[in-house]
């Protein structure tokens, strides 16, 4: 799929986004996969999760009713009730406290139209990272936020979304935004693709993983690195408007790549889980 900027020139090329796969052994795609996830709850592991699915227990509400019939109050039930209420109230900040990154890939397709792919560009300033550009891609439109122009509007824009996807955002993008902007708060759930991809054997930086998967960037930005992003910002500050255009194109390539990598990670983890579930089901019937 080729995407073009406002001038009509091609900026980026990546594989067509895939639909979420369908499985006969996992919960149906009509159910948010996050709400069909039980393995993060106290006392429930992957095998028990598969067992519950085979019994037709497919959502947190199903599990809550099932537990009420079988046990007195305990940590699993209390944790589950808090998460159910947080999801209903859209208190993603509360819900995020219960969800480890190892399972967050399951949320990839749960918030269509309300998912933001985010990446930041920075340059060193006084011993810290100063934010220069923040890019957001929501699957349909790309919006860059530039320091000195509209960066102060970022928080209001992000408030529209319920899932934010980053690459390394846990340790870099989100803490840097909080430190630099001061009043920045991420109220959405956060999917960090580093965790998703690392468990699949994909390590290293974003560009290295793109190369392994055959993702091609436009020649205008192909080969650029974070150091080039710093150089481009400095050139822009010196009066070179084309440098900012190129920096934004570089950031755009980053966020578009995140969308594809999120889909790729979901599909790979989905297939692995499907295989494990099938094996677990066979063991139960032996």
Image (tube, grey):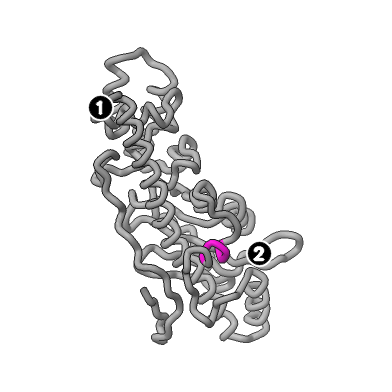
Camera-side residue: 60 or 84? 60
Q: Is residue 59 among what the camera can see?
A: yes
Residue 74 location, x and y as percent?
A: 42, 17
Residue at x 35% of width, y 63% of height: 17
Would you call the spot at circle 1 few (<14 residues within 10 Å), some (14-19), or many (20 or more)?
A: few
Residue at numbered disc 2: 130
Residue 16 vertical position relative to residue 10 in the rendered view, above or below: above
Q: Are marks 1 and 2 in contact (CB under 8 Å)?
A: no
Quarter placement of the C terminus: top left
Residue 144 vertical position relative to residue 205 in the rendered view, above or below: below
Residue 161 location, x and y as percent?
A: 39, 55
Res 281 → quadrant: top left
The magenta stretch spans residue 48: no
Residue 18 location, x and y as percent?
A: 33, 60
In this picture, residue 130 sits left or right of residue 135? right
Residue at numbered disc 1: 55
Mark 1 to mark 2 CA distance (whole Å): 52 Å
In this picture, residue 87 sits left or right of residue 147? left
Considering every residue shown, the one lying at the far right of the view is: 126
Q: Which residues are magenta?
A: 206-210
Q: Nearer the viewer, mark 1 or mark 2?
A: 1
Question: SS at mark 2?
Answer: strand
């Amino acid at each position: 799929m080729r995407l073009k900027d406002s001038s009509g020139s091609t900026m980026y090329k990546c594989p067509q986004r895939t639909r979420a796969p369908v499985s006969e052994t996992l919960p149906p795609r009509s159910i948010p996969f996050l709400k069909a996830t039980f393995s993060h709850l106290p006392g429930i592991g992957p095998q028990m999760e598969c067992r519950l699915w085979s019994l037709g227990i497919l959502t947190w509400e199903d599990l809550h009713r099932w537990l009420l019939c079988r046990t007195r109050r305990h940590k699993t039930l209390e944790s589950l009730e808090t998460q159910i209420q947080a999801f209903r109230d859209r208190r993603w900040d509360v819900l995020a406290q219960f969800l480890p990154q190892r399972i967050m890939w399951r949320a990839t397709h749960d918030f269509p139209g309300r998912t933001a792919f985010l990446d930041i560009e920075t340059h060193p300033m006084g011993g810290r990272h100063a934010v220069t550009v923040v890019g957001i891609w929501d699957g349909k439109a790309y919006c860059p936020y530039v320091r000195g122009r509209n960066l102060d509007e970022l928080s209001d824009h992000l408030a529209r979304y319920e899932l934010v996807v980053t690459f390394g955002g846990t340790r870099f993008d989100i803490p840097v935004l909080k430190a630099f902007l001061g009043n920045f708060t991420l109220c959405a759930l956060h999917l960090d693709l580093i965790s998703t991809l690392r468990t699949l054997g994909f390590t290293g930086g974003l560009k290295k993983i793109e190369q392994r998967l055959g993702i091609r960037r436009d020649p205008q930005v192909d080969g650029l690195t974070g150091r080039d992003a710093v150089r481009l910002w400095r050139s822009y500050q010196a009066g070179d408007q084309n440098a900012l255009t190129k920096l934004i194109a570089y950031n755009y390539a980053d966020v578009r790549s995140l969308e594809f990598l999120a889909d790729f990670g979901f599909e790979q983890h989905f297939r692995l889980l499907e295989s494990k579930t099938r094996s677990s089901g066979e063991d139960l019937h032996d």
